[in-house]
Amino acid sequence: MGPDHEYTILSGINRAGVGRWIAVAAAAISSAIVFLLLAIIDVAKALGVAPQLPTLVLWPLGAGTIYLGLYWFFDRHLWRHPQVSRFLKLPDLRGQWTCSGRTINQDKSPAGAWSAQITITQSWDRLKIRLETKDSVSQSIAAALVRDETGGFLVMYHYRNEPKASAPQDMRPHRGFAELTFSPNGKAANGEYFNGVGRPTFGTMSLEKVDG
């Protein structure tokens, strides 16, 4: 699987605002830790047992270092807590999904059905959607997420498809676009896809979550 890419949140909490909140928390925590440590050293000096600590020891307690730690924890874990996710208006889509697709002809008649396994990896600021059929693998290269009026979420993503070595010879690499509307409980989704140069087809997709 290729590296995760950034994605846009069009109706949730502004990422810059979240960064500022984390920065304020980091500054407060850093100040509190340094103040407490210096107070302990002063007490130890008064008792005549204070160790000689070089200033270098306090550097890791700086706001910058704490900010990195807080941001890592938020990016990897805290954002997906149900209450935090609800506040951020950001669904947790991570996991394995089954996909039932149907290709549609230009005259709107059914052209055939297909099935796939989808893997979604997600953090606060990065996402990856990987779809694998028996003949090819598609991976997202850009995405945006929008909260809709029903309480669900619309995911729009651009993907690159590569046929497997065992695929029919007439299959070609191509790029496409998909729109998926996820249910409010995050367990199912329905949508459409549109392929471009290399395989000018379109159709529908229906997803159900396997795990979680």
Image (cartoon, grey):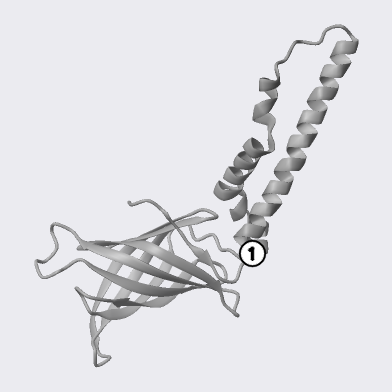
Q: What amino acid type is highlighted by mark number 1?
A: Ile
Residue 140 shown left or right of residue 43 in the figure: left
Residue drawn where x is 56% and y is 49% of the image: 75
Question: What is the quadrant of residue 69 in the picture?
Answer: top right
Extreme-left residue of the structure = 169
Mark 1 secondary-structure assignment: loop
Pick the residue in front: 166 or 210.
166
Find residue 9 and report its horizontal and vertical position in percent.
Answer: 55, 66
Question: What is the quadrant of residue 203 in the picture?
Answer: bottom left
Residue drawn where x is 26% and y is 64% of the image: 161
Find residue 129 and report its horizontal and vertical position in percent.
Answer: 39, 61
| Number of marks present in the image shown | 1
Extreme-front residue of the structure = 55
Residue 199 shown left or right of residue 210 in the figure: left
Residue 80 shown left or right of residue 212 in the figure: right
Is residue 68 something one can see in this rendering? yes
Check disc 1 and report the residue beneath it: 13
Find residue 31 and report its horizontal and vertical position in percent.
Answer: 78, 35
Find residue 41 and report its horizontal and vertical position in percent.
Answer: 82, 18
Is residue 212 something one can see in this rendering? no
